[in-house]
Each structure stands twice: as structure tokens, then as C-alpha cells.
Amino acid sequence: IDVEQVSLPKLKSLRMEDVSLDDETGAAFAELISGCHALEELVMTKMMIDFWDSCSVSNPRVCLSNLVYLEFTDTVAVKYPKASLGSLVETSVGIRMTPDQVFHARDLVNRHYGDKQC
């Protein structure tokens, strides 16, 4: 999606699945969320977000003070932002490794234990 300016002040629920934002800075995500002032439910699955620093929910432009439900599924990121989500009542988080991360993890285990089979 190409996001330049978003104004959805009454939107209460936003579901994004397999969404690829058009920039790697995270500005598009921040712009999208900052235009949703009444957002109570945010579901993000299979997002593959690598730019958490700039699109952080702790970014002053991204206000999620009404958010009561968050569902998030993504690959393991290098770093996650700190966030204040005091209104959050329920959350579901699913983190998975990329194929490269799985390969490196198996390699570390094999080097540690050798090729011993249990």
C-alpha cells in the first residue's frame, strides 16, 4: 500500500494480513495508524516488519490510547520498541523464525551437541 495521508477518526477495528508497505522506513505504517484515533482492535498477521524503530507504537504520532485488543504475528525482529498500552485488555502474539534463523539455530545446536542423536 502507498500511504500518504490517512484520516479514519472513527475506525475501531483494523486487520492487516500479508500487507507489504511501500517503504522501509516505517513512515507509512506510522501514518496509517496515526490517522486512526479511535482504534480499539489492531490485528497484524504475516507483516514481516523490519523497521520497528520508526513505526513504533511509542512514536508520539502513533496514539493507541484506546487499543484494547492486539493480535500480532511476525518473524523475530532484531529489536522491538517499548510501548505504553495501558488500555490493552487482551493480546495474542505469535513469533516465528525465518528460514535463515532456523538454519542458524540448528547449526548452533549441532555445533554445541555435535551430531549426537538422542
Image (cartoon, rainbow, N blue to C red):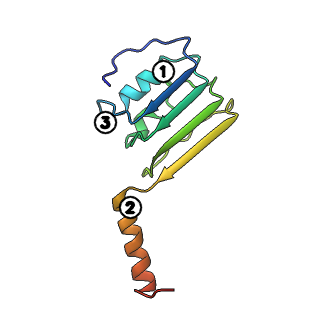
Task: Give me the residue at 40% from left, 80% from top.
Answer: 110
Where 31 falls versus 117 (above or below)? Answer: above
Label pair 2/3, CB-CB below 8 angstroms: no
Q: Label 2, secondary structure: give it.
A: helix
Task: Give me the residue at 43% from left, 22% from top.
Answer: 32
How far is mark 3 from mark 1, CA to CA?
17 Å
Mark nearer the N terminus (2 vs 3):
3
Q: Callout 2, which amino acid?
A: Gln
Residue 18 left/right relative to 86? left
Where 65 falls versus 114 (above or below)? Answer: above
How many C-alpha atoms fall within 10 Å of the one at disc 3: few (<14), some, or many (≥20)?
A: some
> Where is mark 2, residue-wise?
101
Any mark on residue 34, and which?
Answer: 1
Q: Label 3, secondary structure: give it.
A: loop
Mark nearer the N terminus (3 vs 1):
3
> Where is mark 3, residue-wise?
24
Which image quadrant for residue 104?
bottom left
